[in-house]
Every structure is written in C-alpha cells, then in structure tokens.
Image (spheres, coloured by chain):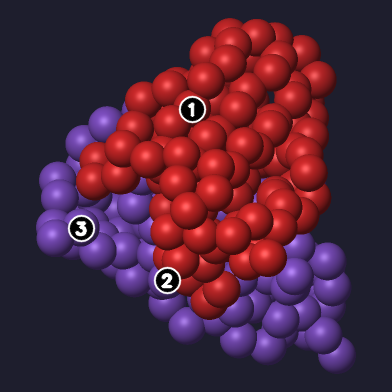
Chain colours: A red, B purple
C-alpha cells in the first residue's frame, strides 16, 4: 500500500497570502496524484488530478505540481472560502490511498 | 446536474449488517465506475471499494475485504454496499463517489454522505 504523507498538518495564513501544501508518497506514483478540498460537514471536492490538471470549475488560483514522490498544491492568493481541509490521493496502485490531510486555517 | 444520494445509515450493533444504497442521477450511470469512501469521525478519508461500469473488476480495501460487498444495478441507477460483521471501527460517514471520466482513478462527484454508527 502506498502511504501518502502530507505536511504541514496545519497551515495558518491570512487571506491574500500564498499557500503551499505538500504530499509525499512512500514510492513513486508517477504523476497519478489528486488533491481534494473538504469543508466541515461537506463531501470532498476534486481540485487537481494527475498532479497538475485543474478539475472542472476550479479557479486558476489553485495549481498542482510534482511527480514521482513529491507533490505540491499551491493556492496563489487565499480567498476566505479556501480555508478548509486538503487531501491528496494516489491512483497509481490499488488500494487507492489518501494522505492524512492538511488543515488550512485563518491566521 | 449530477446527483448522488446515499440511503440513511444508522445505528448497528457490533457483528450486525447494513446495506447502503446510492441513487445516481444526472449522468449515464452505466458508463461510470463507482466507489465507496468513508471518513471516521474527525479522521481522514479511506477508500473502500470500486466497481467498474460493467460490474467487473471490483476492488476492496483490506480493511473491508471479506466483510463488505459492492454491487450495482445499472437499470436502477443505483450503487450498493452490503456491510456484514460490522465493528466499532467501521463507524464513519460513508460516501459514494463517481469515478472521474468513468475511470477508476479519481472521484469527481460525491454524495452527501451517510453516518453509520456501530455500537452496542
């Protein structure tokens, strides 16, 4: 099973700042990684797939990069609605696995 | 509009069974692989199972293999999860999720989730 480790666990920033979230895989997943956003009481929302492709309707301030074992989700300028939990997920192997999440909170 | 609506969960005793369903609408259900994902209270996401559009292949997480069974009825636009031998650690919100582009890769639409509590 591929283990995904996200860092930091919590990120405290202010609106307008740039956010950088990391996800590291225990073995190479090529570019087969996605990012999801989850707000309290809601289902997750797909943001980025295959490391760098924005899903339908996702604002351009969200971008993803990386390959192999190291990946980054960047939010260029934080909007109030961006403060949430973020998860990475790999589709390189079965079982599909998620990272433990990064909480992006308002500073 | 794509919609996925899970059936009501509930309280189940340890060792008991429960069948969840997920009603799909707004897309051609028979063309999409589907998944179940759960989230224990205050915890992260755990993928549980995948079923292809044509019913095979099927995959399970080790944590539920042999206890849970995924199935679908394309005529009824419905996905199911039969859960047997339930344990306290199965307590979670259960989501059905569509495979993006119909593929077994990522999850582009999710239901609202249904809470299953396993407790005596």
User: Dividing the image into 4 quarters, which one contains the N terminus of chain B?
Assistant: bottom left
Q: Are callouts 3 and 1 both on one chain?
A: no
A54 or B90, nearer to the observer? A54
Instruction: Tell me the CA gap for discs 3 and 1.
Output: 25 Å
**Numbered disc 2: secondary structure:** loop
Q: Note whether A12 is above or below A42 in the view shown.
A: above
- Report x, y in % for residue B20: 49, 69
Q: Is label 3 or label 1 in front?
A: 1
Task: Say which mark, if any, is on residue B2.
Answer: 3
Q: Chain of mark 2?
A: B
User: The C terminus of chain B is located in which quarter?
Assistant: bottom right
In the image, residue B5 sits, relative to residue A7, either above or below, namely below
Q: Which residue is mark 2?
A: B112
Q: Quickly name the residue at label 1.
A: A64
Q: Chain of mark 3?
A: B
Q: x, y (%) of residue B119?
A: 82, 85
Seen from the viewer's position, the closer of residues B101 and A31 is A31
Residue depicted at 53% across the width and 76% down the height:
A41
Q: Earlier in the sequence, mark 3 or mark 2?
A: 3
- Density class for disc 1 (Cα within 10 Å; few <14, some 14-19, many ≥20) is many
In percent of the image, x 81 and y 20: which residue is there? A26
Quick check: A69 above or below B88? above
Q: Answer left or right for A84 relative to A12.
A: left
- Cα separation between marks 3 and 2: 12 Å
């Amino acid at each position: 099973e591929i283990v995904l480790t996200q860092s930091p666990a919590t990120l405290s920033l202010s609106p307008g700042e740039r956010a950088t979230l990391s996800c590291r895989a225990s073995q190479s997943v090529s570019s087969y990684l996605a990012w999801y956003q989850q707000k309290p009481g809601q289902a997750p929302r797909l943001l980025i797939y295959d490391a760098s492709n924005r899903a339908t309707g996702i604002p351009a301030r969200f971008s993803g990069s990386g390959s192999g074992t190291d990946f980054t989700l960047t939010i260029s300028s934080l909007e109030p609605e961006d403060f949430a939990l973020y998860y990475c997920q790999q589709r390189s192997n079965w079982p599909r696995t998620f990272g433990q999440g990064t909480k992006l909170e308002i500073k | 509009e794509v919609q996925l609506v899970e059936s009501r969960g509930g309280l189940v005793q340890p060792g008991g069974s429960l069948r969840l369903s997920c009603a799909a609408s707004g897309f051609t259900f028979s063309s999409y692989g589907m998944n179940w994902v759960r989230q224990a209270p205050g915890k992260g996401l755990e993928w549980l199972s995948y079923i292809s559009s044509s019913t095979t292949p099927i995959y399970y997480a080790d944590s539920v293999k042999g206890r849970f069974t995924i199935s679908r009825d394309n005529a009824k636009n419905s996905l199911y999860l039969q859960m047997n031998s339930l344990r306290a650690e199965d307590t979670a919100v259960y989501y059905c999720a569509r495979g993006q582009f119909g593929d077994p890769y990522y999850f582009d639409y999710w239901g609202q989730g249904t809470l299953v509590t396993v407790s005596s």
